[in-house]
Every structure is written in structure tokens, then in C-alpha cells.
Amino acid sequence: MNRTHNCGELRKQDVNKKVTLCGWVHSRRDHGGVIFVDLRDRFGITQIVFNPDCKYFSDAEKLRREFCIEVSGIVKTRKKNMENPNLATGEIEVLIDDLTVLNSSEVPPLEVDDRIIASDDIRLKYRYLDLRRPVMQRNLALRHKAAQAAREYFNNHGFLEIETPFLVRSTPEGARDYVVPSRVSPGKIYALPQSPQLYKQTLMISGFDRYYQIARCLRDEDLRADRQPEHTQLDFEMSFVTAKDIMEFVEGLLKHILKKTIGVDIKDKFPVYTYKEAMERFGTDKPDIRFSLELIDIGEIAKQSDFAVFKSAIDAGGRVKCINAKNCANFSRKDIEELTELVGIYKAKGLAWMKITENGLESSIVKFFSKKVQKQLIKLTNAEKGDLLLFVADKEKIVHTALGELRNELAKRLKLVNPKEFKFCWVTDYPLFAWNEDEQRWEPEHHMFSMPKKEHFKYLETDPGKVQGDLFDVVLNGIELGSGSIRITQPELQRRVMNVIGMTDEEANKKFGFLLNAYRYGGPPHGGMGLGFDRLLALMIGTNDIREVIAFPKNKAAECPMDGSPSEWDPHQLRELRLRLDIIKKRS
């Protein structure tokens, strides 16, 4: 190798050594005829010095940001009071006697440092420059360390890393497939896998017992901060296990990754909430438990009031719930209007409120509550002077969703969240099916291969809404990290579940025949999970934007401004694939 050290390596003990460094010009400064250059690579920055008597001094004058250079020289101690405590190499500098410009650079369209952040469009178009920024290099180094820690944990627990196919049969898994036309089978397509679900279950049937994969998954769906068309899962499956076994394994895995990667040592067991309990207490099945602000059911008290809005909601089979926003009685009318608009996004018809003052409850609706009922309300909500009670009355789903989002918004406004805290929890006992109002049909809550609880088999045909699955989600700081389940292993039970969601036996055989047939040959009981690796990494660095931990992500239109993908079809490709495009081009 040309270089003897990297740019983050040299220390005082290296003084008087002859060294060779390679990297990029981070900055250049001319101080009274002496040129100082901060030389950067992914390991750090080293200050190099060109004195006027250096034969390369005139070349050093021409150096500009992002020139790629190789230099050689002698390590020296920096002059007294000239040390830089912000750099690991801040006590030394290298006096240069040899310079080679490996490559020059045009003026970069973005700053390659962490002080000035370019727009998303510029960052993605010039991703190769954005990735030179120290923060992005740290993020991808963290990704590498986390992947190594995960592999270490899986390997130490008897798992085999096995790759599953990228060209697969198109199967319904909740999102649209990306499809690949086949040249050798005209008129037919492959799909890119949304997950390795069917193949990892097939591996269990094949007797591999414990499988894992750091798996690429592809889904054609609308994008947001924590969603990309390509994402990565820590995917695994285990035979002869219960849900408890899997959950205990995942706790150990996540604790190991955090400790090995960022030095966070989590000692406590992850708390477990049933789906019903999570919805009742937090309004969501992805609860952020770093703060309280739990939902309080005031239905029985509302029945005793004369407030028509509350009573009509209860009479219609709905719910009335509230949040006690501690010490928020000083919220202005504008604050409450903003919160009202927020719950309106989630279909709540309004947001009622009461402030607790030294005179008791104050609000335009207090008159509809007798003194006795007011006392009951204060006791139930544990309200004290200075608190603000916020109410939503509506259908249960609307009440929970609206107050769940309100809870999160209040936590932000009140700064209740410690961004450096990591709070995991489990949510279990999900409904196996969800009712699709738009299509008036049942669909899987997670996926159709999840085992119903045995005591609920009897409801499959008669009352699918009562059926709970042996399902479990792991949540970190209000973000779902992964979903798992014990799988169905009996073909007849699998067909019954498929029938509930409207899939005929003929369709089931056409789409999933290979899995159903495999189960006829002694498939073992098994279960597993897919953990969102990108989401975990993003939360570890304190963001929800997974693009910050992916080398080459797409923008909101699922496009890559850097390489121009997706690109138009080449006519030769179309002929080879025997395809014809029947679309009208947009006028430019």
C-alpha cells in the first residue's frame, strides 16, 4: 500500500516518523507563507504543512477542496497553544516534503462537512460526495458494525446464514410487487421478493432448523421517511419453538447489537402488552413508552353528564377518552386549535378540553357536568391544578388513533422524550384479520401464514373478527421494528385461513401450491420474524429517516437522481423480451 497510516491514526508517539498519507483536501489555509491543509479520509483528519522551502510549495498553492492527494513527510508536534482538542490527531502535524496530486476536483456542488447540509435533491444527486461527509461515513460504519454484531449473535446460537432467491413467483404480501419480464419465457414474469417469507418456511420444512439472512426486500409502495422501495431485514426462522422462545431470542439479539455497536447496555426485560392493552392505554400498537400520557376511559362518567356530544358517541357504540396533559393549563387558544386540527386529520370530529384551576374545572363544557361528576372526573384522571384534560368522543378506532397521535405530539411539545433513551416493548395477541372497509372484506392483519390461537379455530368461518393470532411485534421508541408469528403448518388450516380472506382453493394452489404441497411431507412447527435493520440503525443514530443509513437510497418518487433510475426501455430490450409499450408519453 502507498500509505503508511490513515488520517485518524497519528499521535504524539509517532513524532519524527516518516509517514505517507492519502486522502482528500478538506480545507487549505495560507498563513504568512506557510500552507496548512486538513487532509481527510474516512478515519479522520490530519493537518499537513507545506513550508516555503518545500519544493512542492507552488503545487500546494494550487490545491483546492476535494483534490485527492498523496503526501509524505515527518510527523511533528504542534506548536504550543496551536493544538486542536477537537481532533484526535490535534497534537501533531505532518511537515510535507513530497506531494502527488492523484486527482483534481471541480468545485463541489455541496459542502463535504457536517456544518452546512444541502437539500435532499442535491444530496441524492451527488451522493458520492454526500457520502464523504464524516457523519455519513460514521453512519455506514455503524451499519457494518451492527451487521457484524447480528451475524455474531446468530452464529453463536446455531443459525445458518442461507440466501433465498431474488427472482421469485409473484405472491400477494400486502404491497405491489416489482416485476421482471423473462426473456427465455416470453409473456411470463418474475417478482422481486417483498420478503423471504415462503422460502424461509420452506427451509424449515427442509430440516435446517435455524435460518437467518440479512435480506434485501423490495416493495412497490408509497414512500416516507421510514420506507424505501429497497429495505433490509434481519430475517430469521426457528423450528420447534414457541412465541416465548422467539421473543427471548430477539431480546438478546437487539441488546447484543446495541451494546456491541453503540455501547448501550440494556438490562431490563422488554415489557409485554397485548394488542388490546396497547390500544387502550396508548392508542396505538406501536407505543412509545419513554413517557406516560396514557389514555383514560371516561365513558361511565360521560354517561352521567348532560354533554350531548359525549352521550351520543356512547349511545352509538363509541368511546370517550381523554389525556391528562400535566401542567398544560397555560396552553393558548392557538395551541388548542392546532391540537384540534391534528386530531381532525385522524377523523375526530373535535377536541374537547377542560383546565384545572384553583377554582376547579374551567371550560365551556363544564356546565354540562354536575359538581359530583366533576369530582369523579378529577379523581379518575388524577388531575391537579395546572393540568389540561383533552377529550375525544367517537368510534373506538378514531378515538384511539386520534388520541395516540395527540399523545405523541404532546410529548414533542413538552420535551418529554430523551432522544438517547432506548425503550423496547412487545405487543402480542393481535387480531388475525382486519376488516377492509373500502373493499368490504377480511384481510390478514400481518400475513396469511400466521397461526391462529387454537381456542379461536372455531371462529374462522363464523366470526373472523374474534380470531387472534400467535403474533408478536417488537417496538422501539414508538417505531415498529419487526413482526413475527408462529406459522401455520397444517395445509387444511392454511386453506381455511385463505378462504376467510376470499381466496379459493384453486387460487391458493396456483399462488402457494409449492408451500402447501411441502407441508404434506412432515413440516415441523416453526416461527420467526423479520426485523427492520434500516429502522433500527436510524433510531440508533437518533433519526426516523432510514435514508441516512442507506448508501444509495431513492427519493420520494422512488427515483435515484444520481444514476437516473428508473430509466426508459431500450427498444432492443423490448424486442428481446417480446414486449410492447402501450402508453402515451407525457409532453415535456
Image: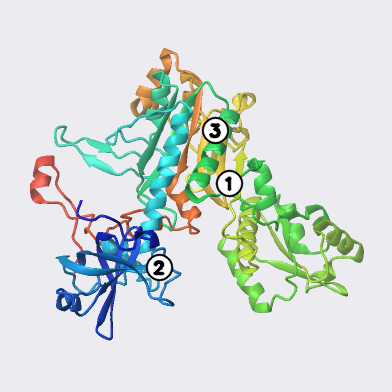
Mark before the other along the chain sequence, 2 or 3: 2
The amino acid at mark 1 is Asp
CA distance separating discs 2 and 3: 46 Å
Left or right: 65 as drawn, with respect to 144: left
Which residue has dot 3 on it?
249
Residue type for callout 2: Glu
Q: Which residue is mark 1?
A: 265
Residue 64 at x, y percent in the picture: 22, 75
- Amino acid type of the residue tagged 3 in the rendering: Phe
Name above or below for residue 480 compared with residue 444: below
Foreground pick, 534 / 403 = 534
- At mark 3, the secondary structure is helix
The residue identified by callout 2 is 91
- Could you tell whether 209 is left or right of 453 in the image? left
Discs 2, 3 touching: Cβ within 8 Å: no
When the figure is inspected, residue 427 is found, relative to residue 379, above or below; the finding is above
Q: Residue at x 70, y 75 (%)?
A: 331
Q: Nearer the viewer, residue 365 or 527?
A: 527
